[in-house]
Amino acid sequence: MKSYSIKFLFLSIIFLSLFQNIYLIEDEDLKIEDEIDENKNNIKKKKNPIRNSRFQEDSDEFDDPNLLHSQNMKEKNIKNQYQQQEPIPIKNTNNSEPQYDDENDDYDKKDLIHILLYKYVYEVSMGSFLIIFILNAIYGKSKNKRIAVKWYNKSKDFFIENYAHIGAEREFNPKKSDALIYDSYNEYKFFASGRIYVNWILVDIILKRRQDLLSMLSGMFLFPEKDKIMYEAVIVPQYEIPVVFCICKKKNAKTMKKNYSEIDNFTEAISPSFLNENLVMFTENTEFIINIFKQPELLAEYKKIEKYIDTIFFTDRRNSKDNYAIVLSYEGTNIKDDEIYKNFTIFAHMLIDTISVSVIKGGNYKKEAEQRRRDFDAQRSKELAERNQEEIRNKKEEEKNEQRNKPMTREQAQKLEEKERKEALKNKRKKMFKFVKA
């Protein structure tokens, strides 16, 4: 909440400054217009001298055109004399240079101030935005680093006691003294290996892009981001366990099926009593998973971190070398109690240990599971072969089109047509042979 309040404060400052500048400009424009009108009136008064009383009398005496013409000439001479007059100096008691009482000078000074203050509104606004962007980058970088360091401090003792090696090789981590690997401003990694039932484990701390002001603003209003702590481990269980299961949020169920074909092909959805209503479980063997979560210690630890669970995924089909893999992803946004970070690590390893020592009862299940996997592999190989053949056909068609579009002589065109005719007859014979054989 603290980070959102700071971002909201920055936004408020930007909008208020912009609106204030707009209103000030409008007010000053109105003042300038009033001053211009007033100065014009004053100038007219100065430029039109006070007429003699004989000019203010009734116009009956100027009925004569000659008199009117002479009078107009006199007025023009008076105006010209007034315009050529220098401004009357004001007495200066400080013996400095004489000052002139000219209202136009005051107007020019005010106009210059208005120009200096309000001409560069956009530049000032962009400068303010740039300063806020830099401050946000510094704050976001330090905030993400504090979160990663909190997780490391709470989990460090557990990894030191349980693993033989902590930290990556020097090529991936130049600062060998720091086991927490800095990947970017919002991503940190931790690697450990050498533990019973665990070949290696990689922890990805993927945090919100707090250093990027635009990303934070889009996250606040359009696409919200969340902090995630992901544990990925390759395990070595005592017994063969051909099982696939997944616990995820209901709203992410379709995405998980799309990303992991094992979930879509081998599992069914269930809702056990211990599971939160916002979560759903996909499993290949319901009895096996229920027995695992019936363990009192594991269930107690599970209840501590249940509301932070994003994904728990276990599969025996990772690759030929490392078959068994498990992924646990937690949402770590706005964690107030730092002990939760330690609970994440403890539950992940308790689940690994429980799965590794568990036994699947019933020989029929293993046979059925192995048959499902063989059928799935055969279907996948068939689809892959068809896809490759389709790509080869498309490539040949493209080459043919390129050859047709090239400029050719008459002989070359005849040779190309003859070649295509022979290929068509060859394909037709193959189809007839397959039909007769069937």
Image (cartoon, grey):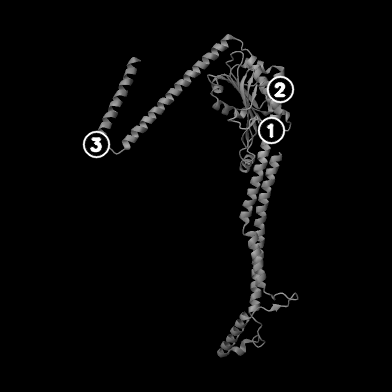
Name of the residue lying farthest toward the top: 363
Q: Quadrant of the N terminus?
A: top right
- What's the CA distance linking mark 3 and mark 2? 81 Å
Of circles 2 and 1, the one toward us is 1
Of circles 3 and 1, the one toward us is 1
Vertical side of 368 occupied by 87: above or below: below
Residue 185, given in percent of the width and then of the height, sits at: 63, 37
Residue 57, given in percent of the width and then of the height, sits at: 65, 87
Can you identify the residue that label 1 sits on? 149
Residue type at the position of mark 1:
Val
Residue type at the position of mark 3:
Arg
Residue 356, given in percent of the width and then of the height, sits at: 63, 16
Q: Is residue 359 visible?
A: yes
Can you identify the residue that label 2 sits on? 301
Q: Is residue 272 visible?
A: no
Q: Quadrant of the C terminus?
A: top left
Vertical side of 26 occupied by 308: above or below: above
Q: Is residue 364 left or right of residue 132?
A: left
Name of the residue lying farthest toward the left: 411
Residue 109 found in image quarter: bottom right
Mark with earlier residue (3, 1): 1
Can you identify the residue that label 3 sits on? 410
